[in-house]
Image (cartoon, rainbow, N blue to C red):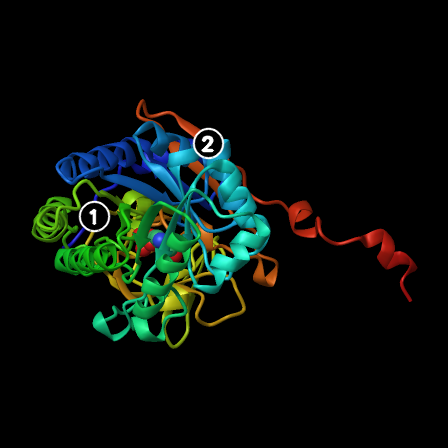
Amino acid sequence: MVSKNLPFTKEDILKIMEKYPTPFHIYDEKAIRENARKMKSAFKDVPGFKEFFAVKALPNPFILKILKEEGFGADCSSLPELILAEKAGMTGDDIMFSSNDTPSEEFIKAKELGGFINLDDISHIDYMERSAGLPEIICFRYNPGSLKEGNAIIGKPEEAKYGFTREQMFEGYRILRDKGLKRFGMHTMVASNELNPDYFVETARILFELIVEISKELNINFEFVNLGGGIGIPYRPEEEPVSFEAIAKGVKEAYEATITANGLHPLKVFMECGRVITGPYGYLISQVRHLKHTYKDYVGMDSCMANLMRPGMYGAYHHITVLGKENEAPARKYDVTGSLCENNDKFAIDRPLPEIEIGDILAIHDTGAHGHAMGFNYNGKLRSAELLLREDGSVVQIRRAETIEDYFATLDFEALKDFK
Ligand SMILES: *Cc1c(COP(=O)(O)O)cnc(C)c1O
């Protein structure tokens, strides 16, 4: 039987539930720190390497503080994300601002924090100059169009709304050079949940080659390249994690063959991964509320798509372990469902699981990125708490569960009384 490990037992969870009722997400601090160190160590020979954690994957300031301690920065794409990073003590070189369709107040805040600003479109040069003034160092997001094949989640680059075309890259840097700017970066982001390390090496090579071309043609100097995020994780138990070493080795070789060979060393190499940093180290813990047998066998959970949207939205696989039944053989296939009035509110379809009873506790794996973060309030559903399992086995609540009062906070019932 294929399985995935858990950093806690059923007894541990029962104890946590005495204080924090289900559903909740729980994150494994020890595993997050170990993984961060593994990544840093794998990339230690890649010039200037730094990872900027994509805040959108797990926008919790406690997690950001842990990652800051491990030497990571934050990749932000909105005002609240910039503020979260700031609250976690990240400013200046710890901030990458990779947004799109950006409002002026976000450029202003990103500039005020002294972060690296990554423009998504050539028209944003003017827009930024008018709204915030140009920063000292500036970066463009490159969209390689049909030069690069897409992957399943992010789609084909030439159909993606992001970034500059190749011609616009040359034109954009020329405009900035002529305005007197001297410090430049280059970015791309063309993958999501990609498990093949070669994909990232090829992306790096495309950027390195473009940097060589533009540096020569415009006689400007690049300080950093940001390879984006998108490293995948093994959601399915039979899948293998991506080797950081394989990516680092390939990127270093491509760097030497292009950047070093053309006399452009040193150039700092950045990434802005989210999923691979925290994804595998989060779990949605939820209890079975009802069992239903009609044309199929249904397990009704005390959680729903508001807590984890990926299966309903993308048909994504999330492994499920029934706590205390880790060693039992599957008894039948179940649809594991939430309580939304939406038939795609299913955590799993036709999933072979041990015989389920009401009150069983399920751990849904790999919810540490794009899990709680994607939650929403459709159907009046409330988002759950987030807990942190510390290295000493203690548990802290790093976000409380929403209440009905939170849900009603934007409504004025007094005004309703007078409304005819
Ligand atoms: C979503 C996103 C990331 C992170 O993607 P992961 O798949 O979580 O690694 C990084 N950069 C940008 C610009 C993004 O939109």
Q: Residue at horizontal 15%, vertical 40%?
A: 46
- Tell us which disc is closer to us: 1 or 2: 2
Residue 190: mark in rendering: none
157 or 419, nearer to the observer:
157
The answer to whether the residues at label 1 and label 2 have Cβ atoms under 8 Å apart is no
Which quadrant would the N terminus be assigned to in this image? bottom left
User: Residue 274, can we see it?
Assistant: no
- Please name whichever residue, 324 or 260, is drawn nearer the observer in this view of the structure: 260
Q: Is residue 44 left or right of residue 123?
A: left
x, y percent for residue 19 = 49, 31
The response on whether ligand 1 sits within 8 Å of label 2 is no
Q: Could you tell me if residue 312 is visible in this image? A: yes
Image quadrant where residue 214 sits:
bottom left
Give the residue type at disc 1: Lys
Which residue bears the numbered disc 2? 88
- What residue do we see at 49% from left, 34% from top? 86
Residue 290, horizontal then vertical, whole percent: 46, 58
Q: In the shown orientation, is residue 238 left or right of residue 270?
A: left
Residue 337: where, in percent of width, then height? Answer: 42, 63
Ligand 1 is found in the corner quadrant, namely bottom left
Q: Which residue is mark 1?
A: 4
- Label 2 sits on a secondary structure element that is loop
Between marks 1 and 2, how big is the CA–CA gap? Answer: 32 Å
> Mark 1 falls on what kind of element?
loop
Residue in the foreground of this view, choosing between 3 and 49? 49
Question: Dot 1: few (<14), some (14–19), or many (≥20) neighbours within 10 Å?
Answer: few
Quadrant in which the C terminus appears: bottom right
Give the residue type that dot 2 points to.
Ala
Lower position in the chain sequence, tag 1 or tag 2: 1
